[in-house]
Amino acid sequence: MSAVDWFLAGPRGRRLLLEYALLAEEDSAVEAKDTFRSAVFLASYRLDVDQGASVVMFGPGAEEARRTVVTAEDVADRLSRVPLTDVTAAVLRSVLAAAVDNARYWQPPSGEDVLAATAPVRGELERIADHVASTPHAQWWSAGLAAADQWIVGWDDADTQVPDGPAATPTTAETLRDYGARTAKEEVRAASDRPADPAAAFSGEWWSVPPTRGSTRSLFDGTPAGLWFVEDDMGWKRAVSRRMPVPGGVRVYEIDGAQAWAQLCREFPVEVTAQKRHDWYSTTGRVGRWVIPDWPRVAEHYDGIHLTVCGYLAAAGTAITVDDARASVIAGWAPDETYWLTDTAAADGDEAQVWVCATDGEHPRWTAERPR
């Protein structure tokens, strides 16, 4: 796949391009009566399955706006006229964070995601993809694990106490063993207790990540990527990061797209149809059997699993074909995240940094807390 194809292949990549175009229009300061942003809002409202429920129009002009019909063709036309501004590292981080934050795997795609997948808008997004892919700031998005620069992020909103390090937790082998037993037990229970109709109003555990600790590299300004890119963000405003020294010779499986994930599922499948079918049908529309990698078995062959940013943008949230009968979903992962399946790599408890998030600006800002 070309760099442009990575952006256009999946819902998270297309959402990133849409978010970039919205920012580019704002930064261009071009005066216009009918903006691209207003077109996206109105068209997305009509396409959103939760229209009138979780997505509501109210206040002066709301009734007129509800009657205004803006089509995907209208949106594409306005998108074609958005001036493309310089791509900076900060802008890329903001739009990637927005694409990640808007991932939803327990409900149908949002109106914005549906809009970005329509043929007219997707066609115009190719221009945005060409522009974004050409910047050097996105070159690392296809890179493998940055072994010399890994950080674990722990969320700490309760007080100013730095959370305990990994020594207070069970070993990774124990965690994986317990997880494997729980997953098998849950599949049996779900098959008995939950409706077989995938469209039934039922939800459970929608994620497909290992139950172990994860790490990411640091970004251009020294902040860990794990601070910024979080699916199903709980609104944390405080975090602690610790460096994770990665020894040489670790066996890391690279997920750079759907095929790499599918291969992992083919080699080490575990059935999760009964426990995932309702959430994953909602987000993908697919009916059928579902599997995820059997992480305890994967741990016998690999020390870590790394998801590249490009792999995330192209494949996260899609129904990935494993074979003629089964599929899987990358859900709950963060771009550039590595999940560790052994205790080979451990956090350095002596090198901790507390971070605080300010939300008074247009975008959240993570800054290092100064020692008192």
Image (cartoon, grey):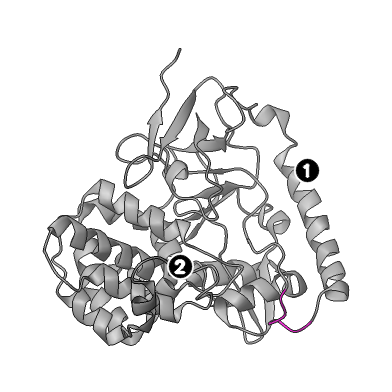
Quarter of the figure that contains the C terminus: top left
Residue at 21% of width from left, 53% of height from top? Answer: 136
Front in this rendered view, residue 203 or 213: 203
User: Which residue is outermost to the front?
Assistant: 60
State which quadrant residue 81 falls in: bottom left
The residue stretch that appears in magenta: 196-201
* SS at mark 1 in the image: helix
The amino acid on which the numbered mark 1 sits, given as a three-letter code, is Glu
Q: Looking at the magenta stretch, what is its main secondary structure?
A: loop
- Residue 138 in percent (x, y) is at 28, 55
Q: Nearer the viewer, residue 241 or 65?
A: 65
Q: Amino acid at mark 2?
A: Gly
Determine contact: label 2, label 1, CB under 8 Å: no
* Depicted 91 relative to depicted 310: above or below: above
Residue 238 in picture, x, y percent from top left = 51, 33
Task: Specify whether 196 is left or right of 222.
Answer: right
**Which residue in the structure is indicated by mark 1?**
174
Q: Residue at x 38, y 31 (%)?
A: 367
Q: Which residue has dot 2 on it?
A: 257
Pinpoint residue 1: horizontal percent, then vertical percent.
Answer: 34, 73
191 relative position to 167: left or right: right
Magenta residue check for 291: no
